[in-house]
Amino acid sequence: MWYWLLKHVLVGPLLRILGRPRVEGLQHVPETGPVILAANHLAAIDSLYLSLVMPRRVKFLAKQEYFVGTGLRGWFIRQVMAVTGQVAVDRTGGSAAADSLAAAKGILAAGDVWAIYPEGTRSPDGRVYRGRTGVIRVAMETGAPVIPVVLSGTDRVQRRGRRCWRFGKVTVSFGRPRTFAPADRTGVRAATDALMNDLVTRSGRRYVNCYAATFKPSHELPEDQERLAS
């Protein structure tokens, strides 16, 4: 109940006023059954807009730290995490990756929608970065379809380093679903790269062949590491 109250009464109307979201390709999302949404990541507010425009409830994996905060702020964050369907995952131990994949499989086994940002973290500059392979591995093991999602404009509503939200124009575009047959490590990497290339092509953004978490803005990239989608 709280999820829908937040979406339709408490937070959703504000998001609609600020971002005036436009939705494309929503017909590609199945009405029932497990599905994976794989999106580019521009701002922390991405998850809110993705949940806002989706008719079905969306679940994400969230750091366990969000669920153990203290004080009023910690309490508020815990409530938001809980009512919006966030699944807590401990990412500090040696089994962090395995635990995350297991949690994702649990969401899909229940027939729900799992959303993930294959880049692993927010883009530091709006470009699309090399994807982590977890989303494809889960898709191959569960048979759940993967729908590429392109978000744009969220970084204008919530600019990096600023707490206040601004007016902007948000677009959420859903691509056609894909399924992936089991493959070896090389096949998993190739499928991940193809997924990221889909996001690059449909978004019109540049691709950077390194992980967003390791990119240093002060370092220039060689030409063969940055390209436009062909």
Image: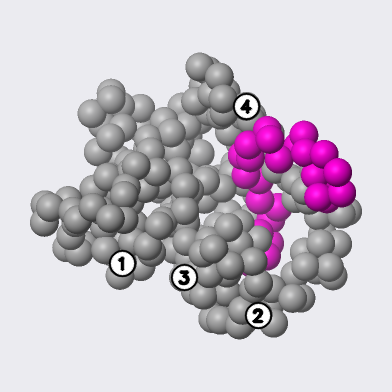
Q: Visible in this render: residue 132?
A: yes
Q: Which residue is mark 3?
A: 152
Mark 4 is on which residue type? Asp
Does label 1 or label 2 sit earlier along the sequence?
A: 2
Which badge, 1 or 4, comes first in the chain's sequence?
Answer: 4
Residue 71 shown in magenta:
yes
Q: What crowding class fits label 1: few (fewer than 14 Cα within 10 Å), some (14-19), or many (20 or more)? A: some
Q: Which mark is residue 205?
A: 1
Q: Which residues are magenta?
A: 51-76
The residue at which mark 2 appears reads as 18
Please, what secondary structure does the residue beneath circle 1 have? Answer: loop
Q: Quadrant of residue 92?
A: top right
Which label lies toward us, 3 or 4? 4
The mark that comes first in sequence, 3 or 2, is 2
Identify the residue at image location x=28%, y=35%: 189
Instruction: Give the alpha-carbon distance from disc 1 to disc 4, as whole Å.
Output: 32 Å
Marks 1 and 3 sit apart, C-alpha to C-alpha, by 10 Å
Q: Residue 132: x and y, percent? A: 38, 38
Along the polypeptide, which appears first: circle 1 or circle 3? 3
Quadrant containing the C terminus in the rendered view: bottom left
Between the residue at mark 3 and the residue at mark 2, the CA separation in whole angstroms equals 14 Å
Q: CA distance from mark 1 to mark 2?
A: 23 Å
Q: Quadrant of residue 90?
A: top right
Q: Would residue 183 appear left or right of 112 to someone viewing this image?
A: left
Left or right of 127, for residue 226 = left
In terms of depth relative to the viewer, which is nearer, 164 or 115? 164
- Asked whether 84 falls inside the magenta stretch, the response is no
Q: Quadrant of residue 6?
A: bottom right
Q: Report which residue position mark 4 lands on.
A: 90
For residue 54, say whether it is visible.
no
